[in-house]
Amino acid sequence: MDVEFVRKQFPALQSNFIFMDNAGGSQVLGKVIERITGYLVHHNVQLGASYKVSAEAGQKLKYTTSKLAELVNASKAEEIVIGSSTTMLIRLLSISISRQWKKGDEVIVTNTDHEANVSPWTDLEEKGIVVRIWKMNPQTLKLEINDLHKLLNERTKLVAVTHASNVLGTINPIKKIAQEVHKAGALICVDGVAYAPHRKVDVRELDVDFYFFSWYKTYGPHLAMMYGKYNLLLKLDSLNHYFIGKKEIPYKLQPGNYNFELTYSLLGISEYYLDLYKHHFPEKTSINHSEKLDKAFEMIAGHEESLAEILLNYLNSIPEIQIIGIPKADSSQRVPTISFIHQKMKSDEIVKKVDDFRIGIRFGDFYAKKLIQALNLQEKNGVVRVSLVHYNTSEEVHKLIKAFQTIF
């Protein structure tokens, strides 16, 4: 992958700071910034009016949503719901869908997820919904499907699970999990926040019912999206004004509407992946859009694996360090979100010393509190997390290693 080409697409990367807290928030594409500005200058009006500028704005946003649907392979644009954050969107889903459930119905959550996909479901216990916990295998730190089987029953309504852990970096086999959940007659709700910046999301291939991720961790603005199968969205109660009915998808799930200029800017992300393909394969123009995305994400995965391998090889060579997650860089098993602890040092001590090198990494529980508790890492102040993406370079990773060498 031509990393120099990639880095030119991100204005913030022209500084001399090294961004390695990308799982907390990635840097923003220049195309995204330009579209935000362009919308505010030329189309900053309310939608639905009869005058020309309003009509143009509506067309631009409709086109953007169609491209987002294409990006994740949704069957229609109405299956894309835009909102302020993944946390808020999952909360809205839980409020609406739980109106269809009865006291004694059950939901399954994991002890590895970010709380965004846990609290909205555990809070339903107040309504009489039974919450069961799918716990990771403490030896492998993986979610075992056999353990899920023991929890599923005829009262299970929904299983909430993450596509990739924002601490462990582990990729869960969502397609297999979805098959098991559907066999039991339940729905699956997937948090893809830690996965989407690294891999192509194909909601139909995965056969998920609901899928969420945040654009501000996927090279865009502070915004998020929910995918939902159309027939399931249709059944949800409206959370908007009383005159906005159940058939008004997705508007009924967007109280106060969505942010227009930020939504329009998301076109820049869709275009970026295609630009990435065109730059590397200028001769190959005959393949379809989906295949171009496949190629772009294959390059991203390969580059990220090479970065993760450099860092993991170093961390594995330090006897006092324990990798929290899969210790190998295999891109089929993990994303380059790498967490570790040191036997003699607390995680915050390490991170604060790295700050002096103008490298941004982080420590803590990253709102995956139940995971940190299950691993008994509270006394360490959580883990040290280095979260890489494809715009990072091997030179940057080596600079981080040099910083670590002054500490360990």
Image: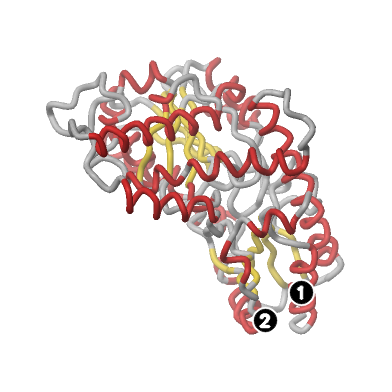
Q: Is residue 50 above or below residue 112?
A: above
Q: Quadrant of residue 238?
A: top left
Horizontal side of 77 relative to 345 (left or right) equals left
Name the one closer to the observer, 9 or 342: 9
Q: Nearer the viewer, residue 148 or 172?
A: 172
Q: Label 2: which residue?
A: 357
Q: How many marks?
A: 2
* Residue at far left of view: 242
Quarter of the picture holding the C terminus: bottom right
Q: Is residue 138 visible?
A: yes
The residue at 53%/18% (across/down) is 182
- Amino acid type at circle 1 is Lys
- In the image, residue 96 lies at what x, y percent? 28, 31
Marks 1 & 2, CB-CB < 8 Å contact: yes
Label 1 Cα neighbours within 10 Å, binned few <14 / some 14-19 / many ≥20:
some
How packed is label 2: few (under 14 Cα within 10 Å), some, or many (20 or more)?
A: some
Q: Amino acid at mark 2?
A: Phe
Q: Secondary structure at mark 1?
A: helix
The location of residue 263, given as percent across then percent down, is 39, 43
- Residue in the image at 40% along x and 28% along y: 106
108 left or right of 251 in image: right
Instruction: Identify the residue shown where x is 49% and y is 20%.
Output: 153
Question: Which of the numbered marks, if any, corresponds to residue 238?
Answer: none
Residue 46: x and y in percent read 22, 41
Above or below, 340 against 232 in this view is below
Residue corresponding to mark 1: 399
User: Could you give the CA–CA distance between mark 1 and mark 2, rounded to whole angstroms?
Assistant: 9 Å
